[in-house]
Image: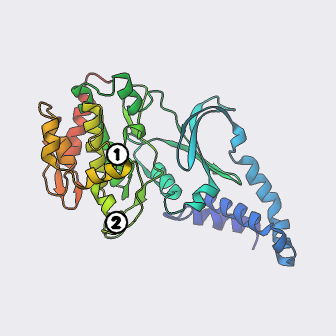
Amino acid sequence: ISPQIAQARLQEVCHVKGSVSLQTLLDLLVGVYQEFSSPALLREKHVQRFLQWAEPLVRQVKKTRISRDDFDILKVIGRGTFSEVALARMRNTQQVYALKIMNKWNILKRGETACYQEEQEVLLKGDRRWITELHYAFQDDNHLYLVMDYYVGGDLLTLLSKFGDRIPEDMAQFYLAEMVMAIDSVHRLGYVHRDIKPDNILLTADGHVRLGDFGSCLRLEDDGLIHSSLAVGTPDYLSPEILRAVEGGGGYGSECDWWALGICAYEMLLGTTPFYAESISETYAKIIHFKVKELCLRMQGWTVNDIISDLLFVRCTVLSVHLLILGYECLSPVISISPLLLCSIWSWITMSVEIY
């Protein structure tokens, strides 16, 4: 077959809907080339012939690829279990990004809790109005890299600290409404975030929410549940369903994210999380045995009382959202949001005069 015909057929394949991209095929070629370059395989004649044929193309592909050398690391702005996030400037454009750097070997050692593939999929497919925007993804021998927008507004945790750990109720209403939209956009892709907390709520320069850090994100299985016995997430924000799954109590769905949103709402208004304790085991015990009435007593006088208590009790309540004078549709055991509510929330957000 001539090179011209081969190229034409390759282009046809890459334009078929749902097919692999040309970039994916080139990545595959580079990966195979690197695997076959090991000393154990180099003795094979057919491997040697393949490497000789592929070497010029692989060299050319590597030249056009983005690499770590294309960025100047300015400073580290965050660290997690598997990764660190750095403020980085791209050399040829001088554009500043947030560069997430993940160690491959740490991910392989703790494969059950590392969700790199899911994170990349959500960043690629997600609604840019509500989640962090991914610009580039690349790798080298030891690391995986994600290049995302850097949000100069910081995060919700930093904002809370500026206000003495609690913010005015009208401000909380605004951010909760946008967080509802952000979380729902992830659920509509069929994923659960599993680590909703103020640290992961990023803020744009004009004060709007972007949901970040999808390193714990998982796709819902065919039965609409996550089946995992690992307590992934941050202890103070874990839902009872996740803790029961750890103890062998079955799966859980997207309600764990709504529970965490309720914790965030409580924290915005009262300056602390509702189940804080000196030890993680005490925190878990409080979560498992919580009572809605006790939380309501602590929140008397707040007009967002109902949304907080109901988000912490999504298995058997219909949510009354006072901050939006609207309602949720609750489907046990998984909460879903009606399109009418989402349209109303969006209208309310866009009509808000003051952006914080």
Q: What's the residue at 30%, 43% (across, down)?
A: 181
Do the residues under discs 1 and 2 have CB atoms within 8 angstroms? no
The quarter of the displayed image where residue 69 is located: top right
Task: Name the element at disc 2.
Answer: loop
User: Which mark sits nearer the N-terminus, 1 or 2?
Assistant: 1
Percent x, y of residue 61: 73, 53
User: Callout 1: few (<14), some (14-19), or many (20+) C-alpha neighbours within 10 Å?
Assistant: many
Percent x, y of residue 42: 85, 72
Q: In screen coordinates, is 338 left or right of 26?
A: left
Task: Name the element at disc 1.
Answer: helix
Q: Which residue is mark 2?
A: 247
Q: Which mark is residue 286?
A: none
- Residue 177 visible to the viewer: no
Q: How is the image coloured?
A: rainbow
Tell me the quarter of the image containing the N terminus.
Answer: bottom right
Tell me the amino acid under the disc marked 1: Asp
Up the image or down, 118 lies above or below 250; here it is: above
Query: Which one is nearer the viewer's eye here, 219 or 234?
Result: 234
Up the image or down, 85 lies above or below 336; here it is: above
Q: What's the residue at 70%, 68% (across, down)?
A: 6
Up the image or down, 10 lies above or below 78; here it is: below
Up the image or down, 10 lies above or below 255; here it is: below
- The alpha-carbon separation of the residues under discs 1 and 2 comes to 18 Å
Q: Which residue is mark 1?
A: 236
Tell me the amino acid under the disc marked 2: Glu
Q: What's the residue at 22%, 51% (across, down)?
A: 337
